[in-house]
Image (cartoon, rainbow, N blue to C red):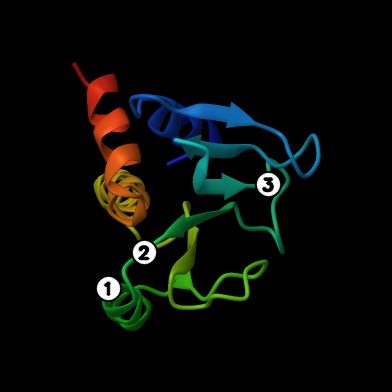
Amino acid sequence: MNIEQLRECCLAVRGVEECLPFDEDTPVYKIMGKMFAYYSITPHDGKFLVNLKCAPERSVELRERYQGVTKPYHTADTLKWNSVNIQSDIPDALIVELVQHSVSEVINALPKKKKEEYFQILI
């Protein structure tokens, strides 16, 4: 997967907001005001990494299975976020699935009223 394909994947999420709160090189993707993905358009040590929310138990499983999934380099919460090298041993289909999983993690953490608001976007 390349960086443009990743952007398209993130923008395909219903209700997504793309913004640049950190700097002009770091797009952030949010739903309901909460981040589910961010990355630098400049490679980090020669790698394009996207940071995605993840269930802690799944983070451990992914890191053990794929070299391209590591603890995040910018986030203190090292089990609820992963850095995913989009040009590594991770199949593109899994990257798409991990973006969707990140969205689900954000939705699941929302208060009931906010969840209901989000699901109204889907109609």
The residue at which mark 1 appears reads as: 58
Amino acid type indicated by mark 1: Arg
Quarter containing the N terminus: top left
Going by the picture, which residue comes out furthest to the top? 123
In-front residue for pair 46/109: 109
Q: Residue at x 50, y 59 (%)?
A: 85
Q: What element carries label 2?
A: loop
The residue at which mark 3 appears reads as: 40
The answer to whether 40 is drawn above or below residue 88 in the figure is above
- Of circles 3 and 2, the one toward us is 2
Amino acid type indicated by mark 2: Cys
Q: Sort mark 2 into few (<14), some (14-19) or many (20+) by Cα contacts within 10 Å.
A: many
In-front residue for pair 15/93: 15
The residue at which mark 2 appears reads as: 54
Labels 3 and 2: the sequence-earlier one: 3
Going by the picture, which residue comes out furthest to the right? 23
Do the CB atoms of the residues marked 2 and 1 lie less than 8 Å apart? yes
The answer to whether 47 is drawn above or below residue 114 in the figure is below
Q: Is mark 3 on a helix, strand or loop?
A: loop
